Amino acid sequence: MSVGKSIGKSARNAAESAAGTSAGPPVDAPAPGRIVIENCAIATVDARDTEHAFGHIVIAGNRIESVGAGAAPAGLEDVVRRIDGTGHLVTPGLVNTHHHFYQWITRGLAQECNLFDWLVTLYPTWAKIDDEMCYAAAQGSAAALLRSGCTTSTDHAYVFPKDGGDILGAEIRALAELGMRFQPTRGSMDLGRSQGGLPPDACVEDTDAALAATAEAIDTWHDASFDSMVRITAAPCSPFSVTPQLLGGAAELARAKGVRLHTHGSETVEEEAFCHEKFGMGPTDYLESVGWLGEDVWMAHCVHMNDSDITKFAATGTGVAHCPSSNARLAAGIARVPEMVAAGVPVGLGVDGTASNESGELGTELRNALLIARLRGGPAAMTARQSLRLGTMGGAKVLGREREIGSLEPGKLADLAMWRVDGVLHSGIVDPVAALVLGAAAPLTLLLVNGREVVEQGHLSRVDEEEIARNVAHAAARLRAE
């Protein structure tokens, strides 16, 4: 399942080529004509938190043309679809800031483990993945995300077996076929168990080889344009699986090529102890020492952050991917998200790998983020609208795409979700945003990415869901048999 490559600023052409065998035109081609949505409640999540109880959105091609109260402007030309949004809330598409797609085919394992024991249990299995398995896993992961209202996702791939084929290319092809905006990372590990790291030596790469592979991924796939469907991030895995040389080298490489940086940080007390024992300092100070704080960096989890850590993140603009369900599943702790947001730290939401979050749905993280914040900080710790902002504009900021996505504003890309909030599960909830965040998972009537329909009436528009399920089951069974 290797994927064809082209060099330089070619990500859109490569994604288009990859998607060419699927139904419909390439997802990154602008949609023709206008789509009009009317009679709906709208939460724009703009800087003023503008909302309309009864409003409209006009989409022209792949851009939002207008958003406002009441009916759409009269006399619009080239309207190819007009949607009655009665009983619905329209929001920006959700943005997923942390994931591990390959884990979709290892769900349900190590159910009572903390992070380190969970990793030790699963590393030997992950060491046997290949590009065919990862294509199926990416399909399954993206299907769950799309059906839960997510339009943009990152993925932290960091296991690259020597005979595994083109894992990153397989993921990019899978998401192009489903129609999702994608910001994958070329992750890496070079600190094996024999050198004092956590992963077995079979799972790690040579430092120089990992940096070369990261540079190749950026040159092959990264597209920095406004309406890009694929951007690449450099992402060594974690302080306990990566040498200082790889972290420092990745930072230099990413900044030379103008891409972002991502890793895990301050996830568990065990990681804190590891950093103090090996480096003589906590995770934040260690990462700062190797050039890993800045506006072009975001960290996953950040559960065990002290006041000094939060201050450094805020001062440098370093972002956080908050993964409430996975943190709870692994008993990692409760991140200090309200304090981070109050200090000015960019914070988005993440599913994390589905081997530590078996559902893989980003929509449910809105509710879990709010509830878990209140467990720590009381009933006013987070509001429904603050949680929605984390899942939309917060995530866009963390990924460096706040100019293009994350809010419903004229000129931004047409990535939006249309949720039904008048059905049996939500009818009578007076506030549609509360219905979405605090209520049961809301049915998704429509999801647009780049102005194109990717989910209709709760089902994927561009691919066969049953085929994805079969592919996932086959890949999981083959991995277990390896």
Image (cartoon, rainbow, N blue to C red):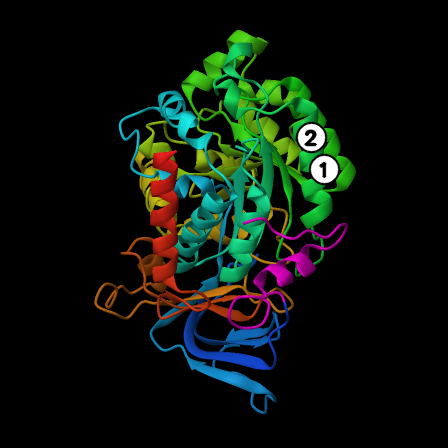
| Residue 141 point in image, percent of width and height | 42, 49
In reply to whether residue 9 is colored magenta, the answer given is: yes
Q: Can residue 331 be seen in this view?
A: yes
Please indicate whether residue 238 sits to the left or right of residue 16 in the image.
Answer: left
Q: Is residue 376 visible?
A: no
Where is the C terminus found, in terms of image quarters? top left
Q: Tags 2 and 1 in contact by the CB under 8 Å rule?
A: yes
Image quadrant where residue 457 sits = bottom left
Badge 1, how many Cα within 10 Å: few under 14, some, many 20+?
Answer: some
Residue 107 to residue 83: above or below: above
Q: In this rendering, is residue 132 above or below 444?
A: above
Question: Within the magenta stretch, is there residue 424?
Answer: no
Relative image position of residue 420 (x, y in whole percent) = 33, 68
Q: Considering depth in this image, is 433 or 329 the residue closer to the camera?
A: 329
Say what secondary structure mark 1 lies in: helix
Q: Is the magenta stretch mostly helix, strand or loop?
A: loop
Answer few, some or many: residues within 10 Å of disc 2's Cα (few below 14, many 20 plus, some between 14 and 19): many
Residue interval drawn in magenta: 1-28
Pick the residue in front: 298 or 249: 249
**Of the residues shown, which amino acid type is indicated by label 2?**
Leu
For residue 420, above or below residue 261: below
Please give the residue where the numbered disc 1 appears in the rendered image: 215
Query: Which residue: 58% across, 58% down?
Result: 405
Which residue reaches farthest left?
424
**Position above or below: 303 against 415:** above
Residue drawn at x 63%, y 41% as measured from the top left: 233
Residue at numbered disc 2: 211
Disc 2 element: helix
Q: Measure how far apart labels 2 and 1 are at the Cα level.
A: 6 Å
